[in-house]
């Protein structure tokens, strides 16, 4: 909300308080001020002048030689290049010696041999935002109203001496979305009275009754609680007075014409949005407030056709929609230069309905913003009368007698009780009842004193943010001054803060992976609908969740897997000659089993990692080698080892969608109950790699929730072995389809506790073994913790392992 200091001073005495000082006081009272803008950007010695004559420059087709009366007692000759300069105009004239924004100094000069004694200025040259001027004033020089006094300082004419305070309001302070609301706030801060406009005294009603010209009905009674209208006849459309245009421009609103400017002016003044209809374009003078019907459309004032939904509130003339209630009027009832009679609207619409309509249509307006925040319902009629009186004065209209209205309900009074002892207990103060009453009087809150130091306060409807006694306590605190409230030491037991186990694990994983040279990435939680089916095994049977108002089709659903985003990041880097990629992401995937979402989806914490390119760059003595499946598996094994669960993880060959059918596996967490599925590891399917323009790419994605529960960071210390180990190697021949992991697991189970370690050191296939056969060589290390093992003991265990492998897998000991 932009607040003009000069405009505000009409409602409250600001003498002795500069704009900067006022901004500081408002900040201290709890409302942030973003900036105090000085409208004068360095203009001096610029006055209003009258162009008496205009002639073409003798030596320049694009220049004009003007004779100007600037009130100095002599006529000035000024060369001007603006296309719109003409004799008979009032214009801003920078005299010789004047200063303009940007450090420009005006001096006597000769332009193509003709002397120029000053400069005729445009709005931009005066430091004004010309985008806020009427369209016809945005190019060329600024043309002033005909009644502008010649010689008057342009600073006074255009109110450039004004200061503008930009308030950064929180949603609960909708009362300060109006000049009067800000005046009440400043009055409470300064302890000064507020002077309000008296529209009833300034307006003269004609003998014609408004009820003979306008009829109002409310069909949508839940969405509109009150609708009022006045009828103004015989208006003359033209520019609004300069003082009004100055105030609108200071507030960031572009003047259009006197009727529209008055509705905007009063909206800024009272916070109550208004709308003016061309009465002769309403069928029979009828107004009906109803909900839209399926298939209805409306061309709004911005000339856009809007498709309406049944929940949208409309203003109709009984036959057709003429406006989107609270958002924007319709082009079919717009006030134009030909408008003679006006129906002026002021209503109380439901904020939720207006918000939903505005968001769905992507149509935000100053009016909708105020309705959404539930403006003061008591301002409906005063704002209507204020606008009618201004239209009578500045548009020559005759205001018909009476107000036509339809009322569903009127706001109930807000009564709040607050006890003095509770005020002091909450604030740590020792206020007297008189001090609290004084602050309520500054706020202009009426109250009644009850027994026991209790005040029953009648809260004005303009302060919709006050509903409880603690709200009143906050008002007392901020107006007394937060800086004046004594400091009270905190007492009581405290609990030291710390990370949760989940937070510790995430931080540990980030440290582990980044220290290993893998870069963390953060991608969007929203993705393309086509990405949700790339990895069916990773997302299983989950349904994609569509976003209600997506930024684009590319970001229109919540992701069910982190892998598609990692592939996009890899493709982005590869397209920019970054071939070697090692990235990971810790984030959430989103799951639901519902066809139509009725509750919040499940958020699953996930870890995903991608490798592509070379394991390491080529050196003079080392060849570059591409990374492979086992590099990725090694990283995942390191993660499990770091979390203390390496011995509880099992890999099982698999062929999930999106992965290479021979180079992928599912990962399971075993032990402590039912086996849990963690995720998938493997190479991306060649077809998907080709579609993404990638080389061999390896990924894994695992769920973190089971790891949170299973992770064990405790470190167990074991004594160094005192007795030697015994090592034996076995080479067995078995069918190619048998997984080596099963062989290793069988060896572990057979050997028992004496087997210290086992690992595979060779896998061989060839014609000598026969078709469908492979040779697997494993190394087994045995050790007894309390004595030295004998060869006979080791040979016996080895024999048992061979026998079990022969029986289980039809394996043969290779000679």
Image (cartoon, rainbow, N blue to C red):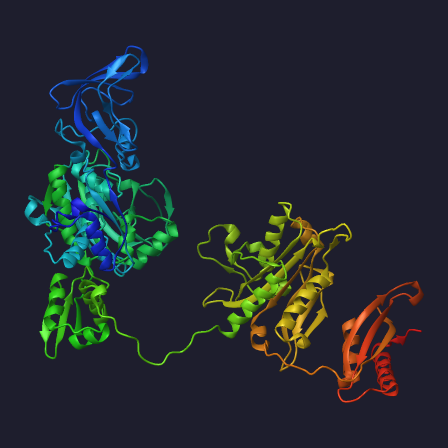
The quarter of the picture where the C terminus appears is bottom right
Residue 123 appears anywhere in the view: yes
Nearest the viewer among 557 and 694 is 694
Q: Is residue 694 left or right of residue 473?
A: right
Q: Is residue 188 above or below residue 108?
A: below
Nearest the viewer among 157 and 293 is 157
Instruction: Pick out the residue farthest to the bottom.
Output: 786
Nearest the viewer among 551 and 700 is 700
Residue 254, horizontal then vertical, whole percent: 26, 39
Q: Is residue 647 left or right of residue 723?
A: left
Residue 65, horizontal then vertical, whole percent: 24, 16
Q: Is residue 483 left or right of residue 440?
A: right
Q: Is residue 226 above or below residue 678?
A: above
Q: Is residue 183 left or right of residue 783?
A: left
Q: Quadrant of residue 650?
A: bottom right
Nearest the viewer among 648 and 479 is 479
Residue 364, horizontal then vertical, whole percent: 33, 49
Residue 278 appears anywhere in the view: no
Q: Quadrant of residue 158?
A: top left
Residue 638, horizontal then vertical, whole percent: 66, 68
Query: Looking at the image, which residue is at 19% across and 39% down?
Result: 161
Total label count? 0
């Amino acid at each position: 909300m932009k607040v003009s200091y000069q405009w505000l001073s009409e409602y409250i005495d600001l003498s002795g308080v500069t704009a900067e000082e006022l901004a500081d006081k408002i900040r201290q009272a709890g409302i942030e001020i973003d900036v105090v803008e000085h409208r004068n950007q360095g203009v001096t010695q610029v006055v209003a002048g009258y162009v008496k004559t205009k002639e073409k420059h003798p030596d320049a087709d694009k220049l004009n030689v003007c004779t100007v009366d600037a009130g100095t007692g002599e006529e000035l000759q000024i060369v001007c290049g603006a296309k719109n300069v003409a004799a008979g105009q009032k214009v801003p004239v920078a005299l010789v010696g004047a200063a303009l924004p940007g450090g420009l100094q005006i001096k006597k000069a000769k332009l193509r041999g003709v002397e120029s004694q000053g400069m005729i200025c445009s709005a931009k040259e005066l430091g004004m935002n010309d985008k806020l001027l009427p369209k016809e004033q945005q190019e060329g020089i600024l043309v002033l109203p005909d009644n502008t006094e010649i010689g008057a300082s342009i600073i006074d004419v255009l109110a450039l001496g004004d200061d503008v305070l930009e308030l950064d309001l929180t949603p609960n302070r909708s009362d300060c979305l109006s000049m009067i609301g800000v005046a009440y706030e400043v009055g409470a801060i300064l302890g000064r009275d507020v002077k309000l406009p008296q529209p009833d005294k300034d307006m003269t009603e004609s003998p014609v009754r408004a009820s003979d010209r306008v009829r109002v009905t409310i069909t949508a009674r839940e969405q509109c609680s009150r609708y009022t209208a006045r009828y103004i006849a015989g208006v003359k459309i033209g520019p609004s007075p300069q003082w009004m245009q100055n105030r609108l421009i200071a507030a960031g609103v572009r003047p259009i014409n006197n009727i529209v400017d008055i509705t905007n002016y009063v909206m800024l003044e009272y916070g109550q949005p208004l709308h003016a209809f061309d009465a002769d374009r309403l069928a029979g003078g009828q107004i009906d407030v109803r909900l839209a019907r399926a298939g209805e459309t409306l061309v709004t004032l911005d000339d856009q056709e809007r498709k309406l939904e049944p929940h949208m509130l409309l203003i109709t003339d009984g036959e057709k929609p003429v406006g989107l209630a609270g958002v924007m009027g319709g082009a079919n009832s717009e006030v134009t230069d030909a408008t003679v009679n006006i129906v002026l609207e002021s209503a109380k619409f439901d904020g939720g309905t207006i918000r939903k309509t505005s968001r769905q249509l992507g149509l935000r307006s100053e009016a909708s913003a105020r309705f959404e925040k539930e403006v003061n319902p008591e301002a409906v009629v005063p704002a209507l009368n204020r606008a009618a009186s201004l239209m009578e004065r500045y548009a020559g209209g005759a205001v018909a007698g009476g107000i036509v209205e339809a009322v569903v309900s009127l706001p109930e009074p807000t009564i709040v009780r607050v006890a003095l002892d509770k005020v002091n207990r909450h604030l740590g103060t020792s206020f007297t009842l008189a001090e609290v009453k004084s602050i309520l009087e500054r706020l202009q809150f009426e109250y009644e004193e009850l027994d026991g130091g209790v005040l029953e306060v009648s809260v004005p409807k303009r302060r919709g943010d006050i509903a409880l006694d603690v709200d009143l306590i906050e008002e007392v605190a901020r107006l007394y001054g937060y800086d004046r409230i004594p400091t009270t030491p905190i007492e009581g037991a405290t609990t030291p803060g710390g990370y949760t186990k989940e937070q510790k694990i995430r931080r540990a994983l980030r440290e582990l992976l980044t220290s290993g040279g893998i870069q963390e990435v953060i991608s969007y939680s929203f993705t393309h609908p086509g990405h949700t089916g790339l990895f069916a095994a990773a997302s299983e049977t989950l349904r994609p969740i569509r976003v209600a108002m997506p930024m684009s089709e590319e970001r229109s659903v919540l992701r069910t897997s982190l892998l598609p985003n990692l592939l996009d990041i890899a493709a982005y880097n590869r397209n920019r000659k970054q071939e070697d990629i090692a990235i990971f992401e810790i984030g959430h995937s989103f799951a639901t089993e519902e066809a139509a979402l009725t509750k919040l989806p499940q958020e699953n914490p996930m870890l995903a990692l991608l490798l592509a390119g070379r394991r390491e760059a080529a050196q003079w003595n080392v060849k570059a080698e591409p990374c492979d499946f086992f590099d990725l598996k090694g990283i995942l094994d390191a993660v499990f080892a770091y979390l203390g669960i390496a011995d509880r993880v099992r890999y099982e060959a698999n062929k999930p969608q999106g992965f290479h059918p021979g180079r992928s596996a599912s990962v399971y967490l075993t032990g402590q109950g039912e086996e849990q599925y963690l995720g998938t590891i493997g190479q991306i399917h060649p077809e998907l790699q080709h579609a993404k323009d990638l080389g061999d790419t390896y990924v894994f994605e695992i769920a973190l929730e089971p790891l949170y529960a299973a992770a064990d960071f405790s470190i167990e210390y074991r004594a160094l072995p005192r007795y030697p180990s015994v090592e034996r190697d076995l080479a067995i021949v078995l069918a190619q389809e048998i997984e080596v992991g099963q062989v290793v697991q069988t060896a572990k189970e057979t050997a028992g506790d004496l087997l210290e370690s086992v690992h595979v050191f060779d896998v061989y296939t060839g014609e000598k073994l026969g078709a469908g056969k492979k040779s697997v060589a494993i190394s087994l290390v045995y050790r007894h913790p309390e004595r030295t093992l004998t060869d006979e003991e080791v040979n016996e265990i080895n024999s048992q392992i061979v026998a079990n492998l022969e029986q289980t897998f039809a394996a043969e000991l290779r000679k």
